Amino acid sequence: MTVAATPAEAIASSGFVEKRPLERYVAPAKPSLVGLPRAELAEALGGAGVPERQRRMRVQQIWHWLYVRGVQNFDDMTTLSKDLRATLAQHFTLARPEIAAEQISVDGTRKWLLRLPGELEDRPHEVECVYIPEADRGTLCISSQVGCTLTCTFCHTGTQRLVRNLTAGEIASQVVLARDRLADWNSVNEPNNNPAATGEGERKRLVSNVVMMGMGEPLYNFEAVRDGLNVVADGEGLSISKRRITLSTSGVVPNIVRAGDEIGVMLAVSLHAVTDELRNELVPLNRKYPLRELLDACRNYPGLSNARRITFEYVMLKGINDSLADARALVRLIKGIPAKINLIPFNPWPGSKYECSDWQQIEKFSEIVFNAGYASPVRTPRGRDILAACGQLKSASEKLSAHERLALRAMTMTD
Ligand code: SAH
Ligand code: SF4
């Protein structure tokens, strides 16, 4: 077996990346242009000496190379002069977040562990990103923060202390990186005719949908999430329509209306309980923004209609929130709000104090919700063999004991 010298070589040679040891991380010396919002890109070009009158056009050209064609070298940007390409290469890179590990589930789900620069040169932060292929779509689940400041008791991310917010560039880069790894770019001569590709229009996309359901609370990193998602939705670039982007929040009420006004993506709300008493325990943010305020914010979500419904997420916890009385109360609680209900089988993690509801119970619960007129797909667990479910991202936590780490390792191949 040959040992690859760089992450790029490791990927190219094996098609599968084992977790690389931490010591080998070298923080990038130059900033990357990948993922930057248009205004930041223009500013960066200005810093490299591109005259102001040219900037708009240059941004337009670079945007196309980055987000339609997916180029990874300035030299491939053939509509730019050689001089400009050299200047850009002097100041910037087109680096994606470094892939520390890639895991591919038997069901096709892929999970990437990504390294982002930390405060200290040689100590990167890690976040995860998961791709879930389905018959009619391919969904990428992306992260908004390293860790989370909130402490939902059923969520593994909640056991990790927040390290930092992701930048807009790092948020959009996750989509770029997934398109790289899935060969999901437009190339001049070869339209993507991959039979697994899905989407509308002439060019079918493997990554057709994005959900912000990875690590972190997106509405506590509002500006970067807004700017990053606007890059993802830009019609001249990555072009994933806002109807196909869903932001999931645990209920940061004041930013819900802002999300509707300033981002305009689909909203998912992590409800999980029908009384304040239980929700205070499961989602402690409820003490600050109780159910009544949360549901009012949902009712007033800008753009809400039967065609643009809010998704209420409800994790099924055995004996905790899964009684049939809970199901009936749930239906009453959201009455009048154009909604879908996503029942999520709880994904246990080492040390978690809950169990997933029995399948029969989930079905009975789902029937009540369905009979009340709500589509209630039970989210099929995907990628279980690689621990890819939401709330499970970035599996190695500093707070896990050695024993728990071992159990986790056995389950996920991460160490
Ligand atoms: N912070 C945001 C988005 C990330 S979590 C939020 O809380 O909405 C994405 C979804 O996964 C949320 O609905 C969350 O409640 C759910 N989740 C977290 N941990 C889980 C687990 N162990 N099993 C099943 N779902 C979980
Ligand atoms: Fe944070 Fe969401 Fe996990 Fe709660 S469920 S701890 S808000 S990531």
Image (cartoon, helix red, strand yellow):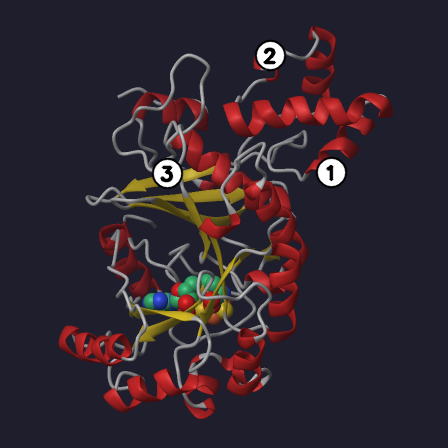
The image quadrant of residue 292 is: bottom right
Tag 1: Cα neighbours inside 10 Å, few (<14), some, or many (≥20)?
some
Sequence-wise, which precedes: disc 3 or disc 1? 1
Residue reaching furthest to the top: 82
Q: Amino acid at mark 2?
A: Asp
Tag 3: Cα neighbours inside 10 Å, few (<14), some, or many (≥20)?
some
Marks 2 and 1 in Cβ contact (< 8 Å) = no
Q: Residue at x 37, y 38 (%)?
A: 199
Q: Amino acid at mark 3?
A: Gly
Disc 2 or disc 3, which is closer to the eye? 3
Q: Is residue 138 above or below residue 183?
A: below
Dot 1 corresponds to which residue? Answer: 40
Distance from disc 2 to disc 3, alpha carbons, whole Å, reads 30 Å
Mark 2 Cβ and ligand 1 under 8 Å apart: no
Q: Classify mark 2: helix, strand or loop.
A: helix
Q: Is residue 368 above or below residue 307?
A: below
Dot 3 corresponds to which residue? Answer: 199
Dot 2 corresponds to which residue? Answer: 75
Disc 3 or disc 1, which is closer to the eye? 3
Sequence-wise, which precedes: disc 2 or disc 3? 2
Location of residue 306 in the rendering, given as x and y in whole percent from the top left corner? 44, 66
Q: Classify mark 1: helix, strand or loop.
A: helix
Q: Identify which residue, 1 or 274, lies in the foreground.
A: 274
Q: Amino acid at mark 1?
A: Glu
Q: Identify which residue, 290 or 308, lies in the foreground.
A: 308
Residue 156, visible in the rendered structure = no
Distance from disc 2 to disc 1, alpha carbons, whole Å, reads 22 Å
Q: Residue at x 55, y 42 (%)?
A: 232
Q: Identify which residue, 36 or 185, lies in the foreground.
A: 185
